[in-house]
Amino acid sequence: MEVKHIFRQCLNIHKKCAYPGFGSRSRFQEILFNGSGLGAVHRLQNSRRYSTGTVSSLEREAIPLPKEARVVICGGGILGSSVAYHLTERGWTDIVLLEQGSLTCGTTWHSAGMIGQLRGNTIEMEMVRYSRNLYKRLEEEGHGLGWKECGSVNLARTHDRMIDFRRKHALASATGLEVHMLTPHEIKQMCPLLKSDDLEGGIWIPSDGAVTAPDVAMVFSKLAKDKGVKILEGVMVEKIQIQNDVVKGVKTSAGTINCEYFVNCAGQWAREVGKRSVPKVRVPLHSCEHYYLVTKPLEKVDRMMPVIRDQDGYIYSREWNGGILAGGFEPVSKPVFHTGVPDKFEFQLLQEDWDHFQILLEQILHRFPFLEDAEIRQLINGPESFTPDSNWILGESAEVDNYYVAAGMNSRGIVGSGGIGKYMAEWIIDGEPSIDLWQYDVRRYVDHHNNRQFLQDRMREVLGTQYILRYPRDDYKTGRKLRTSPLHTRLEVAGACFGETMAYERPMWFDPDKRERGEDVYIHQGSFKKPDWFEIAQEEYMACKERVCLIDMSSFAKFEIKSSGKEALDYLQYLCSNNIALEPGSIIHTGMQNVLGGFENDCSIARIGKNFFFMICPATQQTRALSWLQRNLPADGSVQVRDVTSMYSGINVIGPHAQQLLADVTDVSTTKKDFNVMTCKIIDVGHAGGITAMRLTHAGEDGFILYIPSEYALHVYDTLMNAGKDYGIRNAGYYAIRHLRIEKSFAYWGLDLDAHTTPLECGREFRVKFDGKDFIGKDALIKQRKEGVSQKFVQFMLENFDVDNDVWPWGEEPIFRNGRYVGNTSTCGYGFTLDRMICLGFISDYDENGQPKINPNMNDYVMDKNAIYEIDIAGTKYSAKPGIHTPKLALSSVDPSLLASLHR
């Protein structure tokens, strides 16, 4: 059935254009939102007058721009107002909020206002739960947010979606959120208006609800203003003034204001605002069209109808002023504003595109057949900004001190704004948020992510991923094959199946048959169960333990630290908790702690020369690590730090035959007597020279990582492959490394470790040198060593787990001790030597308020022989055996000298 036939009444909708290609705010839109908070905002904006007697509005005063303020916030939408409110709640009131147009005029005013708490990770669940509770409290206090606790029902059309719901149900229930799994019959009873005969089931969250988004922003603004925040509308930020890479002030259309902190909450303008400083601040986001329609009131619709999310059909719906609001996230979206968002795009919409909306419309009518005869008020097409990985952009920028960003909401701004405001206030005031926000940290990006063409291409995919089922270890398909090592084509021909990290293509496993079948080596079939690469990863794992493999590890972040005197050594001794003062040619594993003792960085440092150091850390830390190094540099310029990630390729030569293989292609002795574990040498391989060879593998097996000038990488790879034929050489991917390190209980930064994890909590206290040196975080670690820790890193081996048929653990599974929730898994994988499914994670002993206790005997608590552990995987609890040390069986093939090196 054609769209025009179904909605023929829509053909006469009033349209008026004030900006070429875009619909302006009109009287029709006021009718559309009549009776809602949005309507109140629109009418008030029309009159350009605000009444102090109303909650959803502010008195628009002619306030002169102050000459200085402690904090300047750019953006008067839901995020800017929330950050201002939460700063005042912490006692900071010397704040100026600048809005280039009118409050809420960007994207906040057309938000659908749905508050859903079900998430796939505890951090975001905690943040949105805080938002929900805050909105409910403010409504109860009489502030008029339009909050209604109607609950929400998420629908599943497929078996895999039900697995996803069961995983989320397990996590939500363990952390205190009431959720209920539903059958199709129960869904029909709860929501009689929807079609249910094609459903597998669903999940019900009774405490979810809906608000009127602009009213929330207005309440935040009013409460902030009542405590002293100055709000100036019609003032544009023209330039953020920087001195010595620190915020000093803001030049605006109304003059200049000096400040200590600047917060970019400019919404879809945030990327452009990021360019208005020297150095520029990268804020990778791009606008996309986002559609929903609104019907006129319908007798059948109950005001307390639950919010419905039919993610397999890409759609959502809620009650709106007696009718239905229904929209969604189509699989292929329409990016917009490729050359920048117009400054004066205020309270405006984009042109309707019924043809593009049809894929959503068909699904709306499929799920709600009664809407075929509904009278439609309008199709809303409002732009919203999205990010390359569909996560928020939060935190202090890598480029400028005291420059903070809260943007890129991916259509989750209203549900996240309360929690984001709270933790941004902590970040600004305390220097760190109280929870780990790395997955949202602005420092997770490199320059490539801010490329306009890349963003436009990636956005076509990102919007749809809001609802498309994402499997564990899924990668995006757009914007790929950009950062590649010199070996990429060679590995592609060899059957490499690639994954992406920091925009870098990395071989995850090798399947030559996949290429021969004509399948895309960048797209993989996802599953919650045994993955299709399992047997291949097992073969590569065994080759690493029994023969020799080559693994392309070029994506690792690499840095050179130099000085003319001993300044570089003193600098690293202060940054690192381990002792760096070893002989040239030595390598050390070390953490770089923050003032709280948490891991700001986890790295390996090779002392190449007396005053020359080479640092390696995970690829995801490239921007973060460089920022940390630069911010702690001596002011006198005596130490030079250089990012050399792209200058060197990395080849991991791993396995018991690695020593002899390398000996065959170089003139340097590779015996352990002459080339000890955790040492490095500059060697030749074949015809290539200047190669830094390090005797370590990051997997607990013997071997070498070769850091090769990139122009020689292909020659070195070919030389090794040709020389290794007699040793059974083969390529291997990152999954082999991952399974090797999980089996040995090696924690990995960004997956297991974060800025809130200390060495004493993850069994790495032996890498902390308390005596004879000072370092950042030392006082916090001394205090923790004396008082005890609040969490402990544990390896669990699952009992009675059927690797072939059961749903696998992938991270964020709740862990129970004697029936009580004590933590979550972080990374998981099969231990091929142990022949067990392995889960790594942190556990705590929580008090009655849900706060972790400090325990001086945490090891005894973990390993208590009377403790019974279980891990909940998608609703099934498996018995789990805990361990705080590497299992002996996992080390049975490892040379004793290598074991000793792990404690350096």
Image: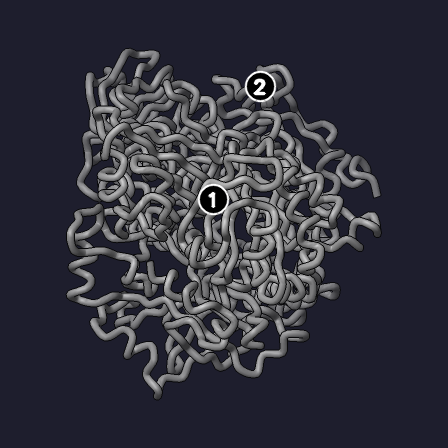
Q: Position of residue 306 (x, y in %)?
A: 55, 57
- Most extreme residue toward the bottom is 866
Q: Is residue 843 above or below residue 21?
A: below
Per the image, the residue denoted by label 1 is 620
Between the C-alphas of marks 2 and 1, the distance is: 29 Å
Per the image, the residue denoted by label 2 is 339
Which colour assignment does the render follow?
one colour
Tag 1, which secondary structure?
helix
Q: Which residue appears at 22% of the width and 55% of the height? A: 769
User: Which quadrant of the rendered structure holds the N terminus?
Assistant: top right
Tag 2, which secondary structure?
loop
Mark 1 or mark 2, which is nearer the start of the sequence?
Answer: 2
Q: Is residue 339 above or below residue 289?
A: above
Q: Give the side of residue 428 with respect to residue 804, left or right.
A: left
Q: Position of residue 211 (x, y in %)?
A: 45, 46
Q: Which residue appears at 59% of the width and 31% of the height? A: 711
Q: Give the number of the mark in front: 2 or 1.
A: 1
Mark 1 belongs to which amino acid? Thr
* Quadrant of res 66: top left
* Quadrant of res 352: top right
Q: Which residue appears at 43% of the width and 54% of the height? A: 674
- Circle on res. 224: none
* Quadrant of res 376: top right
Q: Which residue appears at 32% of the width and 28% of the height? A: 640
**CB under 8 Å between discs 2 and 1:** no
Mark 2 belongs to which amino acid? Thr
Q: Position of residue 274 (x, y in %)?
A: 42, 24
User: Which quadrant of the rendered structure holds the C terminus?
Assistant: bottom left
Q: Give the side of residue 758 with respect to residue 299, left or right.
A: left
Q: State whether residue 68 appears in this view.
A: yes
Q: Nearer the viewer, residue 803 or 722?
A: 722
